[in-house]
Amino acid sequence: MNLLPRKKRRLSRRIQAYYYAVSKRSRYFKGNARQLYSLTLDYLLVQLNLNQDIPFLFVAVIVGLMTGYVAVVFHDAIMMLSSYCFTGLHSIGKVKIIDKYWLFILPLIPAVGGLLVGLYNAFVVKVRPGHGLASVIKAVAQNEGVIEKKLWFHKSLTSVLSIGTGGGGGREAPIVQVGAAIGSTVAQLLRFSATRTRTLLGCGAAAGLAAVFNAPIGGVMFAIEVLLGDFSVKTFSPIVVAAVIGTVLSRSYLGSSPTFKVPEYSLVSNTELLFYCILGILAGLSAVMFIKTYYSIEEWFQRMEKRWKIPVWAMPAIGGLMSGLICMWLPELYGFSYEAINNAVRGNEDWHNMVGIYFLKPVVTALTVGSGGSGGMFAPAMKMGAMLGGMFGKIVHMFFPKITATSGAYALVGMGALTAGIMRAPLTVILILFEVTGNYEIVLPIMFAAVTSSLIARLTYRHSMETYVLEKEGVKVGFGIALTVAEHISIADVMKTDYVTFNISESAASMIDTFFNTPESSFLVTDNDGRFSGIISLDEMRLLLKEDSLAGLIAEDIVKKDVPVLFDTTKLDEALKLFEITDFNMLPVLDDKSNKLLGVVRQEEAFAYYRKQLNLYGSDQHEGKNI
C-alpha cells in the first residue's frame, strides 16, 4: 500500500541530490552563468555523440521538420498577403473612394512592399541582402557552411513581404536559402564539424526545395549538384532523409498533387527530337539573355544609388514601383502567380501574354530583386521558359501537326530547358520537372533539351546566375571547388621531390623490381638530359607483370606521353582543375624554360593543403556587407 509514496520520495531525493551536486560544482566554477551553460551543453553533446552516422540522421530529421514547417508557413503567408493586397483590398475599395483610383494604387502595392523590405534590411538586419543561392554557395565554399543564425527569419520575412506584395521574384530560392540557414544554425548550436555543418546546410536546402515543389528527389539532387558537389553516402543519406521529411510535412498541409497540372504528353515521333534540340538551343540563348538583363539592371541600380546618393532603404521601393507599373498591365508577371505557366503547359495561353512575359519577366525580376528586394530566379526562369516553349510549339505544330505534339508539351520542355541554362544544373531540373508534373512520357525530350540548353549557355556565356556575382565578390567557383584562394598559391608550396623516376632506356626487369620495392603506383620517365617524357602508371605495370613476352621492353616503349603537366610558374588552382577533370593522381612539375623535371604534386596533398588554406581564409569572411 505504501509502495507508490515510497517511490515518489525516492525520485524526489534523487532530484534533490542532482541539484545539490550542480550547486556544489557551480560554487567552484569561476566563470559566469552563460559559460557554465556552455560547458554543460558541450558535456551533454559529447555524451550524446551526435556526430556518429545514426544519431546524425535524427538531427537531419529535425532539420527536415523545421524547414518543412517554415516552408508551409512561408507558402501560406505569401498567398494570404497577395490575396489581401490584390483581392481583399480591391473588394474594400468597391465601397469606398479608393475603387475610383485603383489603377493608380495598383503599382504602389509592390512599392510599399519594397519600402518595407528596404527599411527592415537597413534598420533591423543592418546588412545588405546577399544574392540568394550565391550566398549559400559562398558559405559552403569559403565559410565551412556557416550562415548567420538569424538569417532564416530575416529572409523569410523579407521574401514574404516582397513576393506577397507583387514582387517579380520567385519563392523557391528564398526557401532554399532559409532551409540552408536552418540547417547551418542547428549545426552551429550542436558544435558540429565543418563537414557536418555543410551536410546539414544541404539537408535544409533540400528539404526546403522539396517542400515547396513537392519534389524530394529534385531537392536532393539540387543540394548535391548545385550546392555541395559531394555524392558520398555520408552526405547523401541525411540529405535524402531531410528531403523526405520536408516533403511529407508539406503534403500533409498543402496536399500531394503536382505543382503544375499537366496533360499527358509523349514523344509523337522520333523526328520531333530535332525540334526539341532547336528549342534547347533557343532556351540556352534565352538563359544568357536572362542573366545579362538581370545583372545589367542590378548594376544600373547600384550606379544610380551612388550617383544620386539615394538611401539604400529606398532602392527596393523604387524598383517595386517600376515593376508595379509593368505588372499592372500584365498581372501574370507577378511573382506569386503560376497561372501563366499552367495555361502554357495546357496549351491555352495567348500570344500577347507569351510574348510579353518572355521579354518582360527578366526585367520585372531584376527591378524587384536587383534593387534590393527579395526573391529567387527559379520561378521567373520557369515562367520565361514556358512562354518560349509555348510560342515555339505553336509555330512548329502549325507547320508539322502530324509529327509534333501540341504547344503545351513544348512549353513544359522549354520551362525545364531555360531553367537548366540559367542554373547550369540539367540533372536537377530534369528530376524536378518529372516530379512537379508527374509526367514520365515527356522526360526524354526534357532531358535532351535541358542538356542542350545548358551546353549552349555555357559555350555562349561562361557565367551562370550564381557564378557571375560570386566572381564579382572575388569568389571563383569551378569544377566543384572555390578557386579564389587557390589561384594565389604557388605550385612550389605543394610540390614534392620524393618520387621515383625511370630513364627512357630502363629495362622491364628493372622497372618491375622497383615496383615491388616502392609504395608508389605512378612513375615518371625522363630522357638522358632530365627532361620529362611521360608517366608509367599502374595499368602499364600490370601489363608488364602479366605478359612474359614483354620482358624485353624498355620504359620508352610503354610510357604514357599525353600527360598534363604543371610548371614552376603555375598556381594551385590549375592543378586542382586538372585533378578534377583527369584520372591522374600525380602531376609532374617542370621548369618553365628547360622542361626539366623539378618535382611532383600529388592529388591528396594538393587538396589537403588547399582545404587548410581555405579554412584560414574563410574564417574572416562574412556573408553580407554592412549597410
Image (cartoon, grey):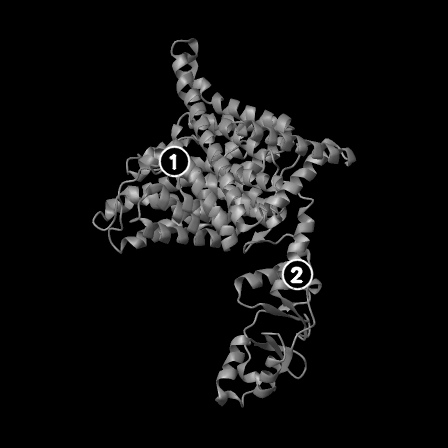
Q: Which residue is mark 1?
A: 251
Q: Quadrant of the C terminus?
A: top right
Q: Earlier in the sequence, mark 1 or mark 2?
A: 1
Q: Which residue is mark 2?
A: 571
On screen, 466 above or below 307?
below
Q: Is residue 122 left or right of residue 443?
A: right
Residue 88, by quadrant, is: top left
Q: Does residue 376 show up?
A: no
In front: 172, or 413?
172
On screen, 462 above or below 587?
above
Residue 562, by quadrant, is: bottom right
Q: Does residue 578 show up?
A: yes
On screen, 243 above or below 524?
above
Q: Residue at x 48, y 86 (%)?
A: 547
Q: Secondary structure at mark 2?
A: loop
In front: 397, or 503?
503
- Measured as percent of width and height from the top left, residue 334 is found at 43, 30
- The outermost residue toward the top is 96
Q: Secondary structure at mark 1?
A: helix
Indicate which label's residue lies in the foreground, 1 or 2: 1
